[in-house]
Amino acid sequence: GIGMATCLQLAKDSFDIVIHYHKNKQKAEEIRAQVEAIGQKAIIISADILSDAEIQEMVKRTIRVFEKIDVLVNCAAAVIPAIKFEDLVWDDYLHQLELNIKSVFSLIKAVSPQMIENGKGKIINIGSLSADKPISDWSHYITAKSALVGLTRSLAFELAPKGIRINMVTPGLISTDLTADVPEKTKLITAAQTPLRRLALTADVAGAISFLASPKSN
């Protein structure tokens, strides 16, 4: 979804790309081929981003190949199960917090020393409009995305003097595989409530990330 569109857009912006995947190697290889067709270098790396050791290895390999990391885009995601509050257990919240907070914290922790050494870096997190306009049955996900707002704001403030600019792109509902379980009625209502009368496209989000990754956003 957003990750693929971002890889292709940043390749068009003349970035070399590191494509992270966990299990879907075939899709990662498809993206690599498309990035190389654009004319940029690309590597794919498998890693469990809930494992600090695998994150460290991913960062080390990236620096071995490309010597530095200019931009980190945190857009890993998973299908969001709709669970009514009376059926939620604390582990449901912990799972979302690990995916949306722990992974982002660990990735920033791993790349920031190298960015500080270079005197600059761009980090872009992906939020969710549901944190501002909640919908039913997503309490566990909305709680995690709300926490990501706090993490992003606090680290943006703390790391800015070191040359690292941290921002968040907060899209509304996007039509991707991850939102396949969202009822069609909900999608139609959401589109009707949007000024453009349509759902966001992955390319729309990638365009915003492109700006934030560029010197234009300095």
Image: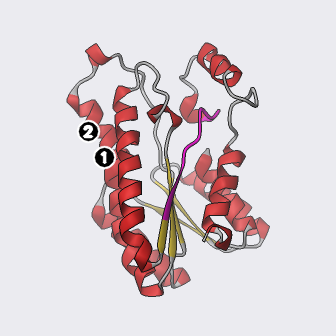
What amino acid type should be assigned to the residue bearing mark 2? Leu
Identify the residue at image location x=44%, y=72%. Answer: 160
One can see residue 48 in this view:
no
- Residue 70 placement (x, y as % from top left): 54, 75
The circle drawn on residue 169 is none
Q: Is residue 78 left or right of residue 1?
A: left
The span from disc 2 to disc 1 (Cα, nearest Å) is 6 Å
Q: Is residue 169 magenta?
A: yes
> Which residue is more in the foreground, 11 or 127?
127
Q: Quadrant for residue 193, please give it.
A: top right
Q: Secondary structure at mark 2?
A: helix
Height in image: 164 above or below 125? below
- Residue 209 placement (x, y as % from top left): 62, 57
What amino acid type should be assigned to the residue bearing mark 1? Glu
Magenta segment, which residues?
A: 166-176
Image quadrant holding the C terminus, namely bottom right
Identify the residue at image location x=35%, y=40%. Answer: 144
Q: Which residue is mark 2?
A: 94
> Which residue is more in the foreground, 161 or 186?
161
